[in-house]
Image (spheres, rainbow, N blue to C red):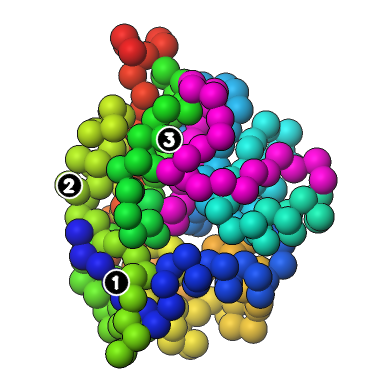
Amino acid sequence: MRKSLRARRADQYWIDRWTATSVDAPAAGVDRYPLIYANKAVDTGPAGELLELGCGPGRLLRYYHSEGIPIVGVDNVSIAISKLREADPSLNVVNADARALPFADRRFAVVLCFGVFHSLEVEVEKAVSEAFRVLRPGGVMCAEFRADNVHNLLIDLYKGQGGANATFHKWNFRASEAQALLEGAGFQVFKREGAVNMPILYHVPFLRHASQRKQDEHALRASGYKLNPVADWAVSNLLRLMPDIVCNEHIFFCRRPGGEHGAT
């Protein structure tokens, strides 16, 4: 695991970010991160209640809620939860730490986890074990880990490493390290994909999709970050040919043994 550094600690970064932003619209980019991967998990897993760890301003949470699918959103930033409750009191949201979830064992059919595990400086293993605990036998988790590769090294160089005040920002995982963490908690990994959230090319304005050159963050988060057709075609094909080099994130699909898939 490689540590990325910034001027602000990860926990303070998320507090500042969600304090400064309003509630998300429901996710709309069905062919983009993260909805494309979340839908694969929901389609693969059993029917039942979903849990989203790290729901933030609610793009996935509000999408599934609008589809009539029962879902609980969890975030450790209290202001994000307060804003979601104020925007829509019908949302089921909880202010809690992923390392100490206030839910009964084996409650959820599917767990969605984007942007959480790699943001924990300590006790990542505990958070993964908690996700396993609250997932029912036969249930599916979709878990994202920031990739330790050339792409993210370039992004870290572009963003800077915090200078004299450098402090923890994110962990970067080799695929084998993330898989070992999941399997150590008891999960059975059945699929892994390389994903691109915001490629480094997106920071070059003329390479962005024409529709996204003047949009605000909420519109971009809802639709997913898009490059212009030529750049998007190039990244998509490179991702297919060299996923571990081109990706930003490792996406793991894993199952808790049991149910119709085998013994607990």
For the N terminus, the quadrant is bottom left
Please check the rendered image and state whether residue 259 is part of the magenta-colored stretch, yes or no. no
**Residue 162: where, in percent of width, then height?**
34, 85
The disc, 3 or 1, on the residue closer to the chain's N-terminal end is 1
**Inter-mark Cα distance, 3 to 1:** 24 Å
Label 2: element kind: helix
Residue at 44%, 83% in the rendered image: 203
Q: Which amino acid type is shown beneath numbered disc 2?
A: Ser
Residue to which mark 1 is pinned: 4
- What is the x, y in percent for residue 170? 34, 65
Label 3 crowding class (10 Å Cα cut-off): few <14, some 14-19, many 20+? Answer: many
| Amino acid type, callout 3 | Ala
Q: Given the image, on which type of amino acid does mark 1 rest?
A: Ser
Q: Which residues are magenta?
A: 89-116
- Spatial CA distance of label 2 from label 1 is 19 Å
Q: Residue furthest left?
A: 176
Left or right: 250 as drawn, with respect to 83: left
